[in-house]
Image: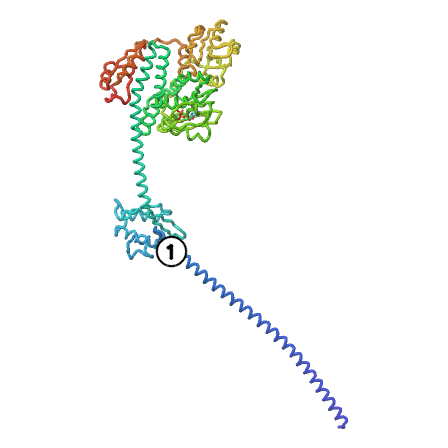
């Protein structure tokens, strides 16, 4: 081989080697770069992981410290709770659903007086056992096992009622047990010894105060009664004195003695009644009576005062309500007198209306009777409404002050109504008027149908002449109830027009503007109408004296009681006259003055009067004379009369 060839070959080999070297170097560099990148990535990763680990570690630390805090708080709360529970003087314990004690405070455990066995873990049944065995509780008349059964029954009930037990040392413990979540039971044992002692002291103090009050009322009642007897003498004698020959001046003196005495008697009677009720000595005397009649009698009595003031006094007695009831008529009259008296007293103009309604007799024959007394008077301010039923309480203002009174009337009425098991109320608007009402449940003495006369059966036509709307409506209903066909007019002129239609009866008011009732009767007679004419008058005395009286068949006092109306209608038919003899009256009276007053009072009456001076004599005379009426003092006589046989 030529040198040149060899050289060429060598150059080629060198060049090849150099190229290979270059290539390997490039490869090495690339590998190096890759390695560098990888190393960088790895280092990043390591860094991140490290940070994460740190975070987790921090969190762990925080949780641990929170837990620690919480634990400490729980511990403090529990300590405080127990401290509180231990501080309270009352027993506290709780039990699990199996009735095993979980915990109890010292006050609870102290009751067991060091009994080791009573501690957390003990069962309720075991506790009951210890209590009876050790005599911790005064179990009264029960046998130990009976007491345990009773207590266990209570414990096992869903919501045990509080129970008061008495410990051996006289302490009273009130057990209050309440079921909680999952059947746990929280038990409180409250020491109520002081409360019970206070209660006993209070009850005793109250009993003594009430007894003292009753004694005082009793004294007052006796005193008032004692004062009443001589006062009756004073009034009665003054009355008799006035009937003798006197100068004007002497008459004035006597009349002042009489009115002052009467006023004093009213007050004494109020005080007497009030004290009697307070002393629980007032007894109701139930007997059959006619409520409607009783109300009408009162209204008639009040009529004089009402007329003087120009007031209309009306009665609206529910036609479907019975009139006869069993109750204490005297007391009902007293209540009505008070309400009516007040209504007239406190009303200057307008009317006073007594309305009687009721709920019909129930299966036991009792009816609920509602009576209201409505006036158009001065009214009562709202803030005084509750006040007026109190004793000696009156509305104290300018308008009221001029009226006299004791302020006892409503207090007595309220007490009487309560005694009867009823209630009393008032509605009032100052300046407009007041409505006082009461309701009582009373046995019906007789069913209303028995009262209704069966004389009119739809054929009868009556003409009513009445200017006053309320009175007209009441009268219409009263007559329609009997089956009478009614035509009403407001005055005599209208009546004269209507009367042509042919009526069987005319019922007319007396005192009418223009032509009055009696003039109307006369005009009718002059016109040839002969039907019965019934005159209703507020002042029957005045009507009776009128020469025109001859034209009317009957005069009735207003307001008209249904019974009277029925009576008059019945009287239009012929009836047998009744044989009359003087009434035999026996008066038992131990006071000589009163006997004198009484005999002077009734002189001139067609009666046979006998006196008994004491109870024994009264009984003897009662047997001998069989009087129609006996007058008797209630508590003045020492000898009680009794019902004679038969
Ligand atoms: P008295 O009438 O003796 O004062 P009451 O107990 O009967 O006692 O009445 C108490 C008070 O109630 C009266 O003084 C009066 O102020 C008020 N009062 C009672 N009834 C009425 C009435 N119908 N209208 C206005 N006020 C009345």
Examine the rendered structure and indicate whether residue 199 appears above or below residue 463.
below
Camera sees residue 167? yes
The quarter in which the N terminus is drawn is: bottom right
Q: In this orientation, which residue lies closer to the viewer: 109 or 502?
A: 109
Residue 178 falls left or right of residue 487: left
Camera sees residue 480? no
> Which quarter of the picture shows residue 204?
top left
Q: In this orientation, which residue lies closer to the viewer: 577 or 633?
A: 633
Residue 592 falls left or right of residue 42: left
Q: Count the marks.
A: 1
Examine the rendered structure and indicate whether residue 222 appears above or below residue 493.
below
Q: In the image, is the residue at mark 1 within 8 Å of ligand 1 by its beta carbon?
A: no
The residue shown at (27%, 23%) is 635
Residue at far bottom of view: 2
Residue 261, percent from left and from top: 34, 19
Tell me the quadrant of ligand 1: top left
Q: How was this image coloured?
A: rainbow
Secondary structure of the residue carrying tag 1 is helix
The residue shown at (32%, 49%) is 152
> Which quarter of the picture shows residue 394?
top left
Examine the rendered structure and indicate whether residue 628 appears above or below residue 143.
above
The quarter in which the C terminus is drawn is: top left
Residue 34, percent from left and from top: 64, 76
Q: In this orientation, which residue lies closer to the viewer: 252 or 387?
A: 252
Residue 575, percent from left and from top: 37, 9
Examine the rendered structure and indicate whether residue 384 appears above or below residue 40.
above
- Crowd class of label 1 (few under 14; some 14 to 19; many from 20; radius 10 Å): few
> Which quarter of the picture shows residue 203?
top left
Which residue lies under the disc numbered 1? 83
The residue shown at (56%, 70%) is 49
């Amino acid at each position: 081989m030529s040198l040149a060839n060899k050289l060429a070959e060598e150059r080629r080999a060198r060049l090849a080697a150099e190229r290979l070297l270059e290539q390997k170097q490039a490869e090495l560099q690339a590998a190096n770069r890759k390695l560098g990148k990888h190393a960088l990535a790895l280092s990043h990763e390591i860094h991140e992981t490290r940070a994460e680990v740190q975070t987790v570690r921090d969190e762990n630390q925080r949780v641990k410290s929170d837990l620690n805090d919480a634990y400490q708080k729980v511990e403090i709360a529990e300590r405080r709770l127990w401290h509180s529970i231990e501080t309270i003087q009352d027993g506290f314990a709780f039990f699990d659903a199996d009735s095993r004690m979980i915990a109890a405070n010292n006050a609870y455990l102290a009751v067991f007086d060091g009994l080791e066995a009573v501690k957390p873990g003990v069962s309720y049944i075991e506790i009951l056992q210890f209590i009876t065995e050790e005599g911790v509780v005064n179990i009264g008349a029960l046998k130990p096992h009976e007491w345990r059964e009773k207590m266990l029954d209570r414990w096992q009930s869903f919501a045990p009622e509080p129970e008061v037990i008495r410990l051996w040392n006289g302490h009273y413990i009130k057990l209050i047990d309440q079921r909680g979540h999952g059947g746990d039971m929280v038990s409180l044992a409250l020491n109520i010894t002081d409360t019970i002692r206070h209660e006993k002291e209070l009850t005793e103090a109250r009993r003594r105060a009430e007894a003292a009050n009753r004694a005082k009322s009793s004294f007052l009642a006796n005193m008032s009664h004692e004062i009443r007897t001589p006062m009756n003498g004073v009034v009665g004698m003054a009355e008799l004195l006035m009937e003798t020959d006197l100068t004007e001046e002497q008459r004035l003196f006597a009349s002042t003695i009489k009115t002052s005495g009467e006023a004093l008697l009213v007050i004494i009677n109020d005080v007497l009644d009030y004290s009697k009720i307070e002393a629980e000595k007032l007894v109701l005397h139930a007997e059959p009576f006619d409520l409607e009649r009783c109300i009408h009698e009162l209204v008639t009595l009040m009529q004089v005062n009402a007329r003087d003031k120009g007031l209309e006094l009306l009665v609206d007695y529910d036609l479907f309500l019975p009139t006869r009831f069993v109750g204490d008529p005297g007391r009902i009259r007293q209540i009505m007198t008070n309400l009516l008296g007040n209504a007239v007293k406190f009303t200057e103009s307008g009317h006073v209306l007594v309305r009687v309604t009721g709920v019909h007799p129930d299966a036991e024959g009792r009816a609920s009777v509602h009576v209201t007394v409505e006036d158009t008077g001065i009214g009562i301010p709202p803030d005084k409404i509750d006040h007026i039923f109190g004793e000696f309480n009156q509305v104290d203002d300018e308008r009221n002050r001029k009226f006299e009174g004791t302020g006892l009337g409503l207090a007595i009425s309220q007490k009487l109504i309560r005694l009867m098991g009823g209630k009393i109320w008032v509605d009032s608007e100052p300046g407009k008027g007041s409505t006082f009402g009461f309701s009582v449940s009373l046995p019906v003495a007789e069913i209303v149908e028995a009262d209704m006369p069966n004389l009119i059966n739809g054929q009868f036509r009556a003409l009513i002449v009445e200017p006053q709307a309320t009175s007209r409506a009441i009268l219409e209903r009263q007559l329609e109830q009997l089956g009478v066909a009614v035509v009403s007019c407001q005055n005599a002129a209208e009546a004269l027009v209507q009367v042509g239609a042919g009526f069987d009866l005319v019922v007319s008011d007396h005192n009418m503007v223009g032509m009055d009732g009696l003039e109307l009767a006369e005009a009718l007679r002059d016109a040839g109408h002969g039907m019965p004419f019934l005159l209703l008058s507020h002042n029957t005395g005045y009507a009776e004296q009128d020469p025109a009286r001859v034209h009317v068949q009957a005069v009735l006092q207003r307001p008209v009681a249904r019974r009277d109306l029925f009576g008059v209608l019945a009287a239009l038919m012929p009836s047998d006259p009744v044989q009359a003899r003087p009434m035999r009256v026996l008066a038992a009276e131990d006071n000589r003055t009163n006997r004198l007053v009484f005999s002077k009072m009734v002189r001139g009456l067609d009666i046979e009067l006998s006196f008994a001076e004491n109870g024994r004599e009264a009984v003897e005379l009662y047997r001998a004379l069989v009087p129609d009426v006996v007058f008797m003092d209630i508590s003045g006589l020492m000898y009680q009369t009794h019902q004679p046989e038969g």
